[in-house]
Amino acid sequence: MVHGQKRPIGIVANPESGCDVRRLVSCASVFPTSEKVSMVVRVLAALGSFGVQKALMMPDKSGIAAGVRRAILSHSATAGDPWPEVQFLEQRIEHTADDTRAAVRTMLTAGVRAIVVLGGDGTHRVVASECGATPLVTLSTGTNNVFPDLREATIAGIAAGLCATGEFDTSEICRRNKRLNIRFDNRHEIALVEVAICRNRNIGSRALWNPDDVSEIFVTFAECDSIGFSSIAGLLRPTSRDAAEGCSVRFSHENPVSWVSAPIAPGLIRNMPIGLVRPLQLGQQIRIDADYGTIALDGEREIEFTAGDNVCLSLDREGPLTVDIRKTLELAADRGLMASRISHSPNP
Amino acid sequence: MTTELNKELLLRAYRMMRRIRDFEERVHVEFATGEIPGFVHLYAGEEASATGVILHLRKEDYVASTHRGHGHCIAKGMALRSMMAEIYGKKSGICGGKGGSMHVADLDLGMMGANGIVGGGGPLICGAALAAKIKRTDNVAICFFGDGGSNQGTILESLNLSSVLQLPAIFVAENNGYAESTASRWAVATGNIADRGAGFGMPAAIVDGHDFFAVYEAAGEAVQRARSGGGPSLIEVKVNRYFGHFEGDQQTYRGPDEVKKLRETKDCLLLFRGTVTKQNLLTDKELDQIDEEVKNEVEDAVAFAKQAPKPQASDLLTDVYVAYA
């Protein structure tokens, strides 16, 4: 096992993820707070096993921080394997995405090696807007996400622990992701998976699920085995995370040239009327022309616009760095980092 | 389901929220004079919840409310005069002055009543929803409850029963952050009340209760699901109340500027006005006119209640038993 000074790891667990209105309109499950707590605990156990001594965690008032505190107390009482000291950041909680932004900024100032993110596409989008060159270890809390990995938190924790050892170059284990930039007046927003132009006037309950409301989507990548609106592009023009382009799909509800059956939400498969499918080049500027509507970023309506508003969109490669968990563990195995650890274990 | 609101519905929504707000602000003032008997628990700040849900309902649909029930009653169509008179304990009140604030009800409107029993509405709407199912109507029943009520056995049993029987029931958890003075983040084990839906095999979602459009959209889906035979749903509305648990509550458990900030940044009426005027759906003039009309309506309701007669001793022996003949 590698020794030496380990930089702290940040943990962001979004209490609001996995609970939106799509649970009423599709077969998506609520992702409970108790499971998020359990995932954080599994991450801590893995970090502790790699000698990480400190983790910085975003606080919340919805039960995740409280649950983790209880778990730490129980763990201390049973004298189990060492966990890192968890420092809950001191910050005002507004129950908005600003909580996440503030937490990430504090983590960067504290010099975290990586940030473990538990949430959906939207959570990762918010973290990505602040994290700069600090890598993210992504964990999906729900079944309706594309950007983060849906995997066991212990494994993500091991990858984060390996990151903290400093044994790897960022370039070895991280991917630089694409992102979509949306500029609206003086506002700059990003999306990591998709931007959807919707005909709804209001942000409303935010979540995007009604195919009749969507006129066009732009995606950074599109996988044929994914879920959500980007799956439409994935089934028409698969585009990898590493491809030097994205893709756009314009829907034609009146005069479709073709149809594609796509899983736009868990258990919700819809026949989508396709008008035009085309690549989206890096750097290409797209102006959104519509009398009114909303713009959904990674599945959540965020921007309301009306005629005369100047909304522009473009694709670049300046998205966040994400840790390739499989690759990290493969490299660790190749270099004997895990074997060395086993030789120190008292277990047979 | 389309969620577009036409102008008529938008005007109705604003008027409904304004009626609730002004009614409650006025009760707050009048209660301090000592003329209103008993306790009152005011709903101001939570208007978008009652309005966003109840706008989807018909007269035949049932609503069971809470001790903080004025808003639900007004949204379901109760007249301000008879409501105010009831709160004043007057004979002209909708329940003859015998119910008061915590038991105001009007079954003709499908309003099963405010309820002094925390979590008492769950079993009531299970009965109403079961009746609708047996009679093969497409009526639905709504149970409003709070974060305190969410921890009561009655609510948990009702969630179970409605799921087992696939009743056309919708459970709306108005989580205003405090059960009396106990913070929900301390007292609700799962953090989010919506988390509990999974335990009962029931779809559940969380919405921002300060945003009328968010509540309206989510509730529309739940009501449609229930009407079409899809069974019950649970919606957690994250919201805040402007006043104490009851009138007279010193609220020492709240931050010094908490309510001031809420009024400045999360007032559902201001948020609504900002949205509809920016989108040119309604004008400030149209909304101002509603403000003026509602102000006069509330003034009239208070005057009516104050001059209304009190119940007599002989009224003690009426309304005690139901005559089924």
Image (cartoon, coloured by chain):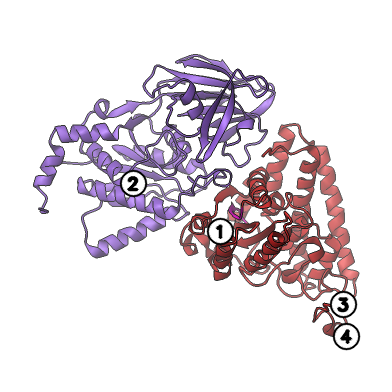
Chain colours: A purple, B red
Work out how far the residue at label 1 is from the one at label 3, CA to CA, in angstroms.
Answer: 37 Å
State if disc 3 and disc 1 touch (CB < 8 Å): no
State if disc 2 and disc 3 touch (CB < 8 Å): no
- Say if the magenta span includes residue B237: yes
Of residues A148 and B24, the one nearer the viewer is A148
Of residues A233 and B116, the one nearer the viewer is A233
Does A242 appear above or below B288? Answer: above
* Picture residue at 73% right of the left edge, 67% below the top: B113
| Disc with the residue nearer the chain's start (4 vs 1) | 1
Q: Which mark is residue B85?
A: none
Q: Looking at the picture, do discs 4 and 3 lie on one chain?
A: yes
Provide the residue designation for mark 3: B310
Residue B129 rendering spot, x and y as whole percentages: 68, 61
Provide the residue designation for mark 1: B177
Work out how far the residue at label 3 is from the one at label 2, CA to CA, in angstroms.
Answer: 63 Å
Provide the residue designation for mark 2: A56
- Say if the magenta span includes residue A328: no
Provide the residue designation for mark 4: B314
Give SS at disc 3: loop
Residue A48 in the figure: left or right of residue B196:
left
10 Å crowding of disc 1: few (<14), some (14-19), many (20+): many
For the C terminus of chain B, give its image quadrant. bottom right
Q: Which residues are magenta?
A: B231-240
Task: Evaluate whether residue B172 shows in this view.
Answer: yes
